[in-house]
Amino acid sequence: MTIRMNFDRVTRYYINSVPYFFEESDDQHAFFRRDDGSAAVERFTWPTLHEIVQQPEWDYEKRSKSVDEAKSRPQPHIGLSALSRTNQTLVCNRWFFVCGLTRRYSEGGLTLRPDGVGQHYPHIKAYAAEEWKTFHEIYGAKYFSSNGNSFGFDASPASILRWYRAVKKAGGRMDALIDKRGRASKLDINQDSYLFIQQQLREFLLNQRHTGREVVDNTINALRRENERREAAMLPLLQTRGKTALWEWLKRFDRLEVDAGREGSAIAKRRYLGVGKTNRATRPGQTFQVDEWEIDARTIIMNGPIREGLDQKTIDRLPRGRRWLYVVLDVATRYIVGLLVASSQNSASAIRALEMSTRDKSDLAAAAGAESIWHGFPFEGVESDTGSAFRAGATTRAVNETCAAYSYPTVGEPQFRGTIERPFLTFTYRVMPYLPGQTFANPKERGDYPTEETAVLTDDQLALIFIRYVVDVYHNTPHAGLFRETPAAALERLSGTVGLPPQLPRSMRRRAFGISLDRKVTSKGITLLGVAYNSRELQKLRRRAKNTKVTLYLEPNDIGTISVCTGKEWLEVECSVENFHGVKLDEWVSVGKILRRRYAGQAALAADTISDALQAMRSRANEAMRIMGVLPQQATAKDIARLEKELYLGLSVVENEIPELDALDLADDGIGYVIGDPDAGQGGALPGDAPSTSDDEEVDLDDPEEDTDWWQEGEDL
């Protein structure tokens, strides 16, 4: 199935460094208009666009919207899920006629009167049929509509005009078309009689808690007495109704109003709190919800590979504690796009969870042994509670750098975040029973369960368990919020119809989710962990009057480029070492420990030496290395400062020296060049080719018994 992308008509997209504006799309292609003065429209296939967004040149610029575009447009189909099947079909058909009338009226020549609507009725119904077809293509027949294959609904011009005015008065809300009158309201009754009956029926809302039968009987008796009084005073009599009609009117009272009057407002509020009904998203990436949860289990506070080789007594003395789980969920599909194990509540963990949600995580799923794919895609808006990790300035800045909106619901009302709160209860009942070292909700529930004695899991083992459950179980389980559709199926369906948001440009991802550092520019540029980053623009910045420290951002998943903020603009500075792109921070730290120990006497390391070590490490990487991004042991700004002082102090990476062949003499036979002193014989060598050795140590560089797995030594993994 073709996976589409959801572009908007406001953003300026740069495809192969050429500016474009999105025009329209279909199942196979997307059409973009050039913004270079030619106004030419080009067509791109969806597979081609997926390749384009992976290129380094991919970028886009969020432009300011106009007043009409910036206005909040309510999602029309919000609130229909609570209606019956018949009412869903009725309201949708009315909505299609309203859309048809709106479209015909915008074309001109139509007056908003019953006779004018009647003259244009064929065009209005044709437009309504098009809306019906579009609705079925997006939401499917099982979503709020009939099972027919065509639009066979008819309506009178007066009804269409009444629906149009109701929707316009409600600000474009679809729920204005819901028929709330009930069967009894169709009976013709004058206003005085209706108001008198309603006044008597409201006795049912008092805290005396009269029964419905008693209220109906009292209303009939009150009508009889009032008519007797009116008859004696020669006044018009009130119209009466039987018990059946009065019972129908009694049922029309809102349940919240009934319970608030009979039992109290506090009880009614708790009973009818809205759960997951706010800002319902209709497309993937429209809204992400993020939250944190303290895992109900105690674990060993360490990483799994470090534990290997320790005896049981040492393991028993290791500290134990509870970890925090950060979860990011897509509201439209209920698909969990981000999951992170953290040591505490902090903004760095929240930012890492948001970064994880925007990229594909198939490598993490494979490391956990999952059989399904773990997708990820950018977000247009983020919702969270008011916890310290989410209210922090760094978290807000990260979301704003991606040109997304950040909102917080009402404080102290977790029921308005039911979409993200519900998975934590699912984890409690579906995952925690399989984990040793449970803490339970309270001591009574725990009983005599030996929590401390059974706490044997480490951070990586805990992460692998949650990843496997989310990817293979949660995503493939029918969800009540999706009408029994699985999150994976909902994502696949919407990605083929509405489309996914385009991938973030690399520079935007680095500025939003990178590690923030402050460095001073030198003649070598900026040096981080022994690696130099330099450019002409950076040297111009060094020559300014006050060469103060600059703020830069380092992407942990690719340290080949850094983003430098000059205060006025952003500079993208690449690494001075060739083929360093794609190297992860964790890999470089691990390789640095090995190389520092093996080449302790050298101040500079050749790029080939580092490249060989990285390739060897990647070829032998296990699941523990691949899931480092979801563990609490992820490097931070403080860790980088400490490593530069301890591990990379005085160490730098240089390119391999290439001899200048023009300065060498040709060999006597005309093949090759003469290197070094020809009188030195075969023993001549370039200085620095062989490592220095002590007087009592001999090194055989051609020893076939040399250990080729030197990079595995020590606790580097």
Image (cartoon, rainbow, N blue to C red):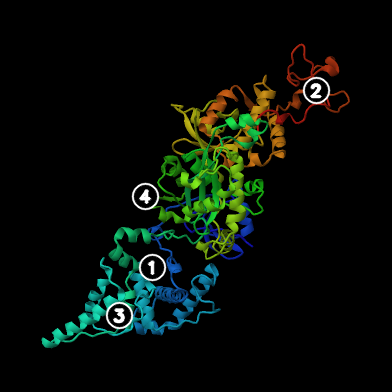
Q: Residue at horizontal 33%, vertical 65%?
A: 256
- Residue 195 horizontal side relative to residue 624, left or right: left
Q: Residue at horizontal 60%, vertical 25%?
A: 647
- In this view of the protein, which residue sits in the foreground, 469 or 6? 469
Nearest to viewer (mark 3 / mark 2): 3
**Residue that badge 1 annotates:** 173
Q: Which amino acid is tagged 3?
A: Leu
Q: Which amino acid is tagged 1?
A: Arg
Badge 3 local density, few (<14 within 10 Å), some, or many (20+)? many
Badge 2 local density, few (<14 within 10 Å), some, or many (20+)? few
Q: Which amino acid is tagged 2?
A: Leu
From the top left corner, tell me how far across and down residue 474 is, in percent.
57, 55
- In this view of the protein, which residue sits in the foreground, 466 or 442? 442
**Residue that badge 4 annotates:** 411
Q: Which mark is residue 239?
A: none
CA gap between label 3 and label 2 equals: 103 Å
From the top left corner, tell me how far across and down residue 535 is, in percent.
56, 33
**Residue that badge 2 annotates:** 701
CA gap between label 4 and label 1 equals: 27 Å
From the top left corner, tell me how far across and down residue 315 is, in percent.
61, 32
Task: Inspect this view and state whether residue 501 appears.
Answer: no
- At mark 3, the secondary structure is helix
Q: Which mark is residue 246?
A: 3
- At mark 2, the secondary structure is loop
Task: Inspect this view and state whether residue 591 appears.
Answer: yes
CA gap between label 4 and label 3 equals: 42 Å
